[in-house]
Amino acid sequence: MTAYQFDFSAVFSSLPTLIQGAVVTVELTAIGGGGGLVLGIVCAWGKTMGPLWLRKLLGGYVEAIRNTPFLIQLSFFYFGLPALGIRLDGMQASLLAIVINMGAYNAEIIRAGIDATPRGQLEAAASMAMSRALMFRHVVLIPALSRVWPALCSQIVLLLLDSAVCSQVATKDLTYAANIIASQNFRSFETYFVVTIIYFLLALAIRRLLRETERHLIVVGASSK
């Protein structure tokens, strides 16, 4: 039995393809994460301050998403919607699935932050005759986001890693690029080893960026109290 001979040259020669895939992965994370954050804020507002019918509707949405696999949700948008005449390419289906999935998880996280708002702050805002929209933004939302931002950051990092699933619907992300390269050079160990390092570095970079954002948000949140 001959010893395995490592050869990373075939992988390094395909670095442009991996870089293109990494760019798509970052796009999925940034666009999907941003959209999921906005949707989460809207849903959290609806679940805490909306009418009863809206709270029940959003509650059903959150439970449905949180209790089904992301791969099934992604497959529904990519393979299921064409049966209704709605055709999405891999990137479109991936972004839609990510936003809807992240929105449900973020809604619960943000709602917990909203529920922790001291009643005294709400009473003080009401005594100043602030509009509900203004009160929600400055008295409720910003301090709530500063409380739960670490949890939201963890969700974004998990999104970066879980976005690899999107390669299953022909989204040309980093994992998709790795699969193509490994099938061409037959160097699966070397290919996925390099891709693992790239994912690790991307996760570290995003954590650092989000940590800087957290510091700014804490200052803004403190000034809103």
Image (spheres, grey):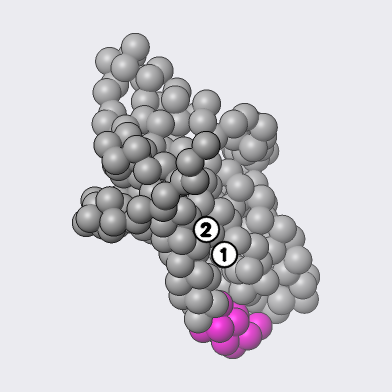
The kind of residue tagged 2 is Ile
Residue drawn at point x = 71 percent, y = 76 percent: 121
Q: Which of 196 and 116 is in front in this view?
A: 196
In the drawing, what numbered circle is on residue 153?
1
Q: In which quarter of the view is residue 96 placed?
A: top left
Whether tag 2 and tag 1 are in contact, CB under 8 A, the answer is yes
Q: In which quarter of the view is residue 70 placed?
A: top right
Question: Could you tell me if residue 149 is visible in this image?
Answer: yes
Question: What percent of the width, then of the height, locates residue 217?
Answer: 54, 79
Residue drawn at point x = 56 percent, y = 83 percent: 215
Mark 2 surroundings within 10 Å by alpha-carbon count, few (fewer than 14), some (14 through 19), many (20 or more): many
- Numbered range of the magenta stretch: 214-225
In the drawing, what numbered circle is on residue 156?
2
Question: What percent of the width, then of the height, locates residue 56?
Answer: 66, 34
As drawn, is 31 to the left or to the right of 120? left
As drawn, is 12 to the left or to the right of 6? left
Q: Is mark 2 on a helix, strand or loop?
A: helix
Mark 1 surroundings within 10 Å by alpha-carbon count, few (fewer than 14), some (14 through 19), many (20 or more): some
Question: What percent of the width, then of the height, locates residue 149?
Answer: 60, 68
Looking at the image, is 45 positioned above or below residue 181? below
Q: Nearer the viewer, residue 127 or 171?
A: 171
Residue 94 inside the magenta-drawn segment? no
What is the CA distance from the residue labelled 2 to the residue labelled 1?
A: 5 Å
The kind of residue tagged 1 is Cys
Q: In which quarter of the image is the C terminus?
A: bottom right
